[in-house]
């Protein structure tokens, strides 16, 4: 493990952990609200949200930056994880909904008498946690198996993943699917029987997200520096040669693809209780393609770049949507164009060029 | 005014000898309700078309009495109800004749019945349609009488149906059997409940209709009717499929050039469709108050092509040119372009949908069968799509530009060596593909909403068409578009729109597994390019 990063890398990660697990919680909980140093609920949620996105960006970087597979459907896996967690959170509302019924409000509204089969056992946290991992993983595995086996790659693969998330979005928009239709899930009250909107819970979720982010980073670093990671990069650069060397590329790609989907699912599950809503628009093709630009801005093929890119783009997004909402799409569009034209290696590429490497 | 005209005609033509039944008209004004209804029936039985005007005036509350005379009062003018002559002076003291609901109902059917014998075809047709919707038992003799005189086939069909419906309720056994047969020959879904009613069982298991032979006839007629209705359904389904297919083809044809031939993934293709639609909107605005509004499309079609082509060529020069051979980067950059175009249109025209009106010759439709109406706008689009396809094909196969485009596609280096200006050909070909997207937008504006998000709805579909059809061929695009259109509509008819779409997407994903090159693949060494 210690060989993953040099001393400076470990110091940076340690500093990040200190900030996430000690400084921010203290600023949010112990510092009085009147103080200028107080971290308000808005900031806790925003940073927590961006860390979820950063996990997604890492997952995307693993497959795009290291394996050369551009997925335009990662929003689907993110949303599936979110929905799995959302089902548990909806169960946790109990009888505190508008209709004071055992079933979630939208089911009462649709005049359903019992939970549909998808909701089986979702009242238990361990089952929800299992779904968070298993559903995106399984779907990605099956889809990837067929796609990689028939050697679909490049743009074809991208377009098909886009169709996949588009189809799923249409499906989830329907009330009959049993996931709340247009409105999705919202109005959560509790998680693990603890009220979900109190400052302490928020900080706990924040810290959990931070832990997940650091864990994902270390896992990704370990993978990419291992022998497996080198084969992956070789597949990205010249797949046929790797095949001729005797490697079964399908399994290499399938593993990283499934892992990436699972990471997205975990990020989605952490995202939902913090933001308080999940609906089918998370699966829209536009959302998925935005993930690619986070990675592109930060710099493909560098893990730190993915995190930096997710932070930069989403930070800019929340700033713009508050101050100049009508200009955000121009900025995002320009970002897509300029990064692909002038910054093929992203921000990290700029930095390393300055360092003379 | 419409009601007034027959009245006026009546007034001018009225001759005392052929006037209406005086006693009946008198009863209209002075009798009690029963007497009035009897008088209405008498007037109807007489069958004088002029009575229609009088009864209509009655229904409109324009009838009043003064002394012993019955008058029709229209505004300030008064007419004698019997002769129709205009009165010189409108008497000051009048009593309005009150119309209650019962009378109004009687008047309604009576007027319809009288209109059946009107000399004007349109009046008769309208009246026959009204009666087919629900006629009173007492109308039967009248309908039969009208049927005896009617020459027009369409009116006859409607009347026969009405007569059969009425006959079925009251007529003799033979006439009922005849009526059932007539019903079996119609293609009007409204007759189905009538026949089903005959076959119904009561709760105790006996049939509502005791006569077994009648039931057998009804069964036969029902089968014939169902068969015909099923054909109507199939016909409208097939048309919906062709229509959707032609739209998909228009949307995908441009992609077949930019992606299929040039290999450029243009995610902004949908937005170029949108630009075409908005250009149509702008051109329509110029024509709005002029006399040539019906022909604004003649200007809008080339304008949409040029606008989208120019935007496309500008994009090619500014962005896409630098990304040739890097498809994933092209995808992201063009996605960025599409975001900016959407926002630009929002800034210019607002986020709301804009209204694009059909020219009058494109509204309405052909009624092939009862309940099967093919809208003109969609028919026009089918032909338009065919014309665009033919034009594109000719351009690619018969012109020098087409030759260059194919040459550059097949072997860029070689084409360049023999002096083809590859960079210019790229720009022009890209412009052509985008221009066709503009044409698609112009067509779409005629049948759907025009808004900034218009293109987003088509981008996934049109890529599916190209992927399914195979890269590098126009024929593949055509077959894939029509096939997808049909499949979509066919599935839609028994599983709903959303599930149909999902099923089609799932099918494509599975299909690509089997044939990653699409239906029509270019054979050769370029597979791993």
Image (cartoon, coloured by chain):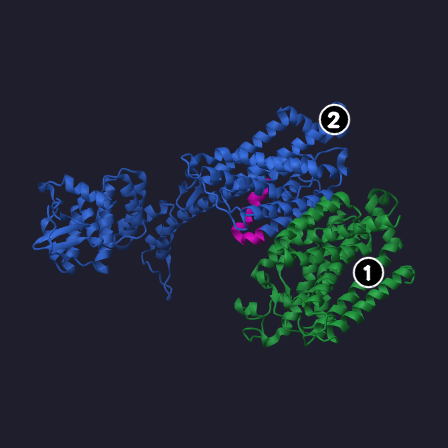
Chain colours: A green, B blue
Determine which residue is flagged by label 2: B415
Task: Specify the quadrant of the image occupied by residue A201.
Answer: bottom right
Mark 2 neighbour density, 10 Å: few (under 14) some (14–19) many (20 or more): some
Instruction: Work out whether disc 2 and disc 1 sit on a shared chain.
Output: no
The subunit letter for the residue under badge 1 reads: A
Could you tell me residue A76's position as x and y percent? Answer: 68, 56
Q: Which mark is residue B440?
A: none
Q: Is residue B513 visible?
A: no
| SS class, disc 2 | helix
The subunit letter for the residue under badge 2 reads: B
Could you tell me residue B101's position as x and y percent? Answer: 24, 60
Task: Specify the quadrant of the image occupied by residue A314.
Answer: bottom right
**Residue A201 magenta:** no
As drawn, is B145 to the left or to the right of B422? left
Q: Is residue B435 above or below residue A62?
A: above
What stretch of residues is rendered in magenta? B481-500
Q: Is residue A170 above or below residue A133?
A: above
Task: Specify the quadrant of the image occupied by residue A140.
Answer: bottom right
**Residue B498 magenta:** yes
Q: Nearer the viewer, residue B394 or B478?
A: B394
Q: Residue at x 38, y 66 (%)?
A: B203
Q: Is residue B369 above or below residue A194?
A: above
Determine which residue is flagged by label 1: A217
């Amino acid at each position: 493990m210690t060989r993953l990063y040099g001393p400076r890398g470990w110091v940076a990660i340690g500093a990040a952990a200190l900030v996430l697990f000690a400084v921010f919680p203290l600023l949010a909980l112990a510092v009085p609200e009147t103080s200028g140093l107080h971290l308000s609920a808005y900031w806790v949620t925003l940073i927590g949200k961006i860390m979820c996105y950063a996990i997604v960006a890492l997952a995307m970087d693993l497959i795009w930056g290291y394996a050369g597979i551009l997925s335009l459907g990662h929003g689907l896996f993110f949303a599936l994880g979110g929905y799995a967690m959302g089902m548990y959170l909806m169960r946790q509302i109990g009888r505190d909904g508008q209709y004071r019924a055992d079933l979630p409000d939208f089911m009462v509204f649709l005049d359903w008498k019992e939970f549909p089969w998808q909701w089986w056992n979702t009242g238990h946290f361990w089952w929800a946690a299992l779904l968070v991992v298993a559903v995106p993983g399984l779907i990605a595995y099956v889809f990837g198996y067929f796609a990689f086996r028939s050697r679909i790659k490049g743009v074809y693969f991208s377009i098909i993943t886009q169709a996949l998330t588009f189809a799923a979005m249409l499906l989830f928009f329907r009330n009959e699917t049993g996931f709340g239709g247009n409105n999705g899930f919202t109005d959560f009250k509790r998680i693990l029987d603890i009220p979900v909107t109190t400052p302490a819970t928020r900080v706990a979720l924040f810290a959990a997200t931070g832990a997940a982010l650091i864990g994902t980073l270390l896992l990704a670093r370990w993978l990419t520096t291992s022998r497996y990671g080198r084969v992956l990069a070789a597949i990205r650069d010249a797949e046929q040669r790797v095949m001729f060397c005797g490697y079964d590329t399908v399994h290499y790609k399938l593993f990283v693809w499934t892992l990436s989907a699972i990471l997205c699912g975990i990020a989605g599950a952490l995202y939902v209780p913090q933001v308080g809503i999940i609906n089918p628009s998370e699966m829209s093709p536009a959302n998925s393609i935005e993930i690619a630009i986070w990675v592109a801005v930060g710099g493909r093929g560098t893990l730190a770049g993915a995190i930096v890119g997710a932070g930069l783009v989403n930070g800019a997004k929340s700033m713009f949507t508050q101050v100049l909402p009508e200009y955000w799409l121009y900025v995002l569009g320009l970002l897509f164009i300029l990064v692909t034209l002038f910054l093929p290696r992203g921000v990290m590429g700029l930095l390393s060029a300055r360092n003379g490497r | 005014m419409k009601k007034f005209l027959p009245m006026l005609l009546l007034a001018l033509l009225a001759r005392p000898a052929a006037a209406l039944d005086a006693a009946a008209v008198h009863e209209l004004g002075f009798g009690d309700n029963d007497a009035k209804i009897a008088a209405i029936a008498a007037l109807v039985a007489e069958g004088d078309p002029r009575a229609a005007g009088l009864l209509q005036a009655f229904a409109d509350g324009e009838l009043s009495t003064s002394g012993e005379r019955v008058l029709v009062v229209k505004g300030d003018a008064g007419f004698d109800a019997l002769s129709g002559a205009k009165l010189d002076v409108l008497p000051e003291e009048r009593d309005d004749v009150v119309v209650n609901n019962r009378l109004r109902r009687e008047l309604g059917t009576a007027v319809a019945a009288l209109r059946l014998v009107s000399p004007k075809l349109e009046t008769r047709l309208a009246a026959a349609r009204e009666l087919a919707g629900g006629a009173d038992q007492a109308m039967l003799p009248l309908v039969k009488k009208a049927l005896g005189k009617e020459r027009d086939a369409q009116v006859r069909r409607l009347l026969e149906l009405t007569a059969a419906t009425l006959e079925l309720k009251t007529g003799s056994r033979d006439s009922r059997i005849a009526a059932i047969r007539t019903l079996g020959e119609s293609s009007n879904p409204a007759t189905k409940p009538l026949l089903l009613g005959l076959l119904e069982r009561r709760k105790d298991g006996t049939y509502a209709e005791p006569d077994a032979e009648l039931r057998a006839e009804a069964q036969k007629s029902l089968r014939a009717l169902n068969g015909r209705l099923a054909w109507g359904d199939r016909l409208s389904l097939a048309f919906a499929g062709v229509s959707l297919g032609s739209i998909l083809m228009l949307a995908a044809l441009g992609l077949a050039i930019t992606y299929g031939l040039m290999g450029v993934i243009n995610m902004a293709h949908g937005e170029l469709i949108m630009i075409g639609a908005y250009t149509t909107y702008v051109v329509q605005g110029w024509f709005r108050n002029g006399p040539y509004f019906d022909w604004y499309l003649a200007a809008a079609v080339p304008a949409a092509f040029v606008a989208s082509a120019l935007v496309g060529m500008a994009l090619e020069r500014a962005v896409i040119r630098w990304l040739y051979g890097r498809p994933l980067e092209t995808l992201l950059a063009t996605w960025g372009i599409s975001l900016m175009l959407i926002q630009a249109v929002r800034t210019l025209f607002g986020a709301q949908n804009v209204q694009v009106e059909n020219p009058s010759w494109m509204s309405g439709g052909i009624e092939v069968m009862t309940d099967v109406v093919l809208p003109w706008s969609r028919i026009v689009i089918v032909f338009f799509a065919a014309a665009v396809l033919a034009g594109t094909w000719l351009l690619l196969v018969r012109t020098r530009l087409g030759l260059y485009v194919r040459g550059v596609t097949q072997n860029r280096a070689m084409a360049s060596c023999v002096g083809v200006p590859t960079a210019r050909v790229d720009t022009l070909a890209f412009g052509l593909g985008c221009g066709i997207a503009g044409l698609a937008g112009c067509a779409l504006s005629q049948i759907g909403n025009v808004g900034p998000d218009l293109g987003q709805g088509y981008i996934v579909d049109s890529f599916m068409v190209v992927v399914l059809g195979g890269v590098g061929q126009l024929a593949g695009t055509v077959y894939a578009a029509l096939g997808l259109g049909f499949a979509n509509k066919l599935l839609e008819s028994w599983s709903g729109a959303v599930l149909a779409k999902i099923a089609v997407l799932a099918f494509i994903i599975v299909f690509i597994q089997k044939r990653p090159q699409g239906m029509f693949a270019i054979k050769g060494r370029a597979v791993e390019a």
